[in-house]
Amino acid sequence: MKVEGEKKEEYKPFLTKLADLPTEELFGPGHRLCSGCGPAIAMRMLTKAFRGPTIVFTATGCVEVSSTPYPYTAWGIPWAHVLFQNTAACASGAVEALNKMVAEGRAKKADVIAIGGDGGIVDIGIAAVSGALERNHDLTIICYDNQAYQNTGLQRSGATPLGAWTTTSEVGDAQAGKTEWQKDILGVAIAHNIPYAASATIADWRDYINKVRRAIEVDGPAFIHVLAPCQLGWRYDPSQTVAIARLAVDTKFFPVYEYVDGVYTINRRVPSPKPVEEFLKTQGRFRHLFEEKNKWIIQKIQEGVDRNWQRLVNLERATNPNAPKA
């Protein structure tokens, strides 16, 4: 029970230096994910945050089909493939079953993690995600965001950015890529008044792993949104995956922040941001935006990026006494 005026103990990160990084590989090599695959990097990194017995549920998607082709698996832990729409529901059931079995002395405590791409978390599975967060199950939900249904044919999702080409947001006389803004899935999660939520990218392994570990340690539901570029759908050289993820932060296209018990903190401040077009021009999915007739869309994206960043700054100033004043 919280006592009014009680001072919170400052959270100590799991990792502070490279030597702290666990050497055990719980997401092994030999899977069939693409070279330069952002989600593959995200999966390997997140397993480094595990603190003990862990059960993972994974929605249909790139990670599932490519890391567990029967009879093989890249996972060195209990793992289950469930449907696109019910990952969080299955994880919720596992949490409650474990609670009962532990209380009866029939099982040991284990952490439960639900993993899905933007298709399985942002779109098709969002009802189950919302239910799990609202019911306050003690689990961690991780959305690896490659900004489209890349596994099934590069179709647009609710996380696909404005102006991006996909096979279902074509480029031509009628339109120039996707015509809608992407969904703010982290904001949706935070709206459930959960104790912990955070964004991260695969470009900063320490920040990402520490956030996953903190999410696991939280008593109650937690949500992690990790940007994981897709070389196939985004149309870039596979060697550039991490660099592009870093550029998303340096242009403020993808803000890195966390929400802890109602308090916002921007973790990666960008005092001298690069123009968003520096991020866009690295990817073939935005190539058409640099045609003269479509350059207005780049300006619109820049305005959206600036507006979103200012919104986060305002939220931080309103909730965090340690926020910079200017």
Image: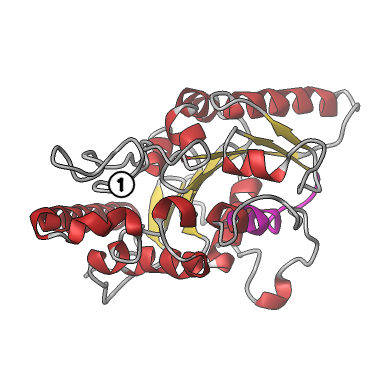
Q: Is residue 28 left or right of residue 35?
A: right
Image point 23% across, 65% down: which residue?
277
Residue 310, percent from left and from top: 22, 57
Image point 77% across, 54% down: which residue?
26
Q: Is residue 322 visible?
A: no
Image point 76% across, 27% down: which residue?
99
Tell me how the rendering is colored: secondary structure
Vertical position of residue 77 compared to residue 213: above or below: above
Task: Depth check: give the residue in front, 63 or 252.
Answer: 63
The residue positioned farthest toward the front in the image shown: 172
Q: Amino acid at mark 1?
A: Trp
Q: Residues within 10 Å of mark 1 (few under 14, many from 20)?
A: many
Task: Depth check: give the residue in front, 118 or 113.
Answer: 118
Vertical position of residue 159 compared to residue 288: above or below: above
Residue 73, percent from left and from top: 78, 44
Task: Depth check: give the residue in front, 8 or 4.
Answer: 8
Q: Is residue 182 left or right of residue 195?
A: left
Image point 42% across, 42% down: which residue?
148
The quadrant in which the C terminus is found is bottom left
In which quadrant of the rendered view does residue 294 lie?
A: bottom left
Vertical position of residue 250 compared to residue 169: above or below: below
In which quadrant of the rendered view does residue 83 lie?
A: top right
Task: Depth check: give the residue in front, 170 or 81.
Answer: 170
In which quadrant of the rendered view does residue 101 lie?
A: top right
Helix, strand or loop at mark 1: loop
The span shown in magenta is 42-53
Residue 104, percent from left and from top: 87, 23
The quadrant in which the N terminus is found is top right
Residue 315 counted in the magenta span: no
Q: Which residue is mark 1?
A: 165
Residue 322, percent from left and from top: 36, 65
Q: Is residue 280 left or right of residue 159?
A: left
